[in-house]
Image (cartoon, rainbow, N blue to C red):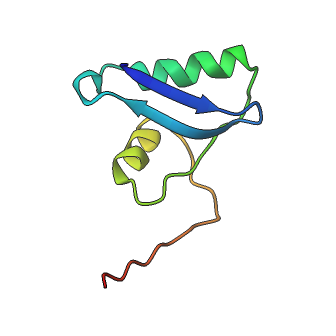
Amino acid sequence: LIGGLNIHPNGKVSFLWIHPDYRYLGLAKKLIHQASIDLNIAKLRINFPNNMSLMGFVQHLGFDKDELTQYEMIHTL
């Protein structure tokens, strides 16, 4: 398996993964693009709590950040 995408017809991306050996080749961008065409989606929503690499990826693609923001606080026991 090289990559996977789970996208709902309303445009919510709930899973996006590319095998580390195949990253930085544009495969995730192609997956998102093809899914948006196949499902006729005009707007996508991606949530990525605690995943800074995904945040950098979507910013690189030109996504805008919503006004709503979630912060997580972790306390190790």
- Quarter-of-image position of residue 17: top left
> x, y percentage for residue 66?
63, 56
- Quarter-of-image position of residue 7: top right
Q: Is residue 65 above or below residue 14?
A: below
Q: Is residue 50 above or below residue 17?
A: below
Q: Is residue 48 left or right of residue 43?
A: left
Q: Residue at x 22, y 24 (%)?
A: 21
Q: Residue at x 49, y 52 (%)?
A: 48
Q: Is residue 17 above or below residue 22?
A: below
Q: Quadrant of the C terminus?
A: bottom left
Q: Quadrant of the N terminus?
A: top left
In this view, the residue in front, 75 or 60, is 75
> x, y percentage for residue 71?
50, 72
Q: Residue at x 76, y 20 (%)?
A: 40
In this view, the residue in front, 61 or 40, is 40
> x, y percentage for residue 54?
41, 45
> x, y percentage for residue 58?
46, 41
Residue found at the very far front of the displayed protein: 77
What is the tally of numbered marks visible in this picture?
0
Residue found at the very far left of the displayed protein: 21
Q: Is residue 14 left or right of residue 76?
A: right
Q: Residue at x 51, y 20 (%)?
A: 31
